[in-house]
Image (cartoon, rainbow, N blue to C red):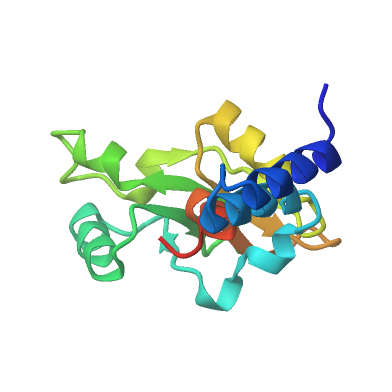
Amino acid sequence: FVTREEIAHLAMEGQSSGILTNDEHKMIHEVIQLKTRLCREIMIPKDKMHWVDGTMPIPSLLEFARTKNVDRFPVYDSVKNNFTGILSIFDVLSDVDNASKSAKDYIRPLQLVMDHTPVDHVLPRMRVTRQPLVLVTNERYAVIGLVTLNDVLDEVVGNL
């Protein structure tokens, strides 16, 4: 196996010799740094998250998604006062009989990570669960934010 330090050294040599561009070197460096970055450092805080209530009718949900320009949302249960799952707009749009349904009919299981989880641990979890969104919790297991695949990629390549 090759260590992170060896990869960093090879990237530095590659940049010095002109094999790698400055941008390529920076991207390799950022991938290596994911181990030291924590979810709390890159998350979208709860007060800036967009979520939907499980009772939201589909027409309202589609309009909300359109105005927020987001295709996945945490689903909130206001009666239980907690998040119950994740909704993908693609699931809603692929169901031709969605008019009489609500957001709760399309929820996928939640993926939760602690705020001190290293970002490089989140990517494999997203891949295995095929869910590009995780909710971030504090030590009391209260949701304090979310991390998307796009947030992780932004750390590596900059804002997309």
Q: Residue furthest front?
A: 17
* Nearest the eye: 31 or 94: 31
Residue at position x 68%, y 57% from top? 136
Q: Is residue 80 visible?
A: no
Residue at position x 29%, y 64% from top? 69
Query: Which part of the image, by quadrant, shows the C terminus?
Result: bottom left
- Residue 138 horizontal side relative to residue 52, left or right: right
Residue 21, image x, y percentages:
53, 52
Residue 43, image x, y percentages:
62, 64
Is residue 40 shown above or below 6? Answer: below
- Residue 32 horizontal side relative to residue 123, left or right: right
Q: Is residue 147 visible?
A: yes
Residue 92, image x, y percentages:
26, 41
**Total labels drawn:** 0
Residue 108, image x, y percentages:
48, 38
Asked where in the image residue 42 lies, by quadrant, the reply is: bottom right
* Nearest the eye: 27 or 113: 27
* Nearest the eye: 139 or 106: 139
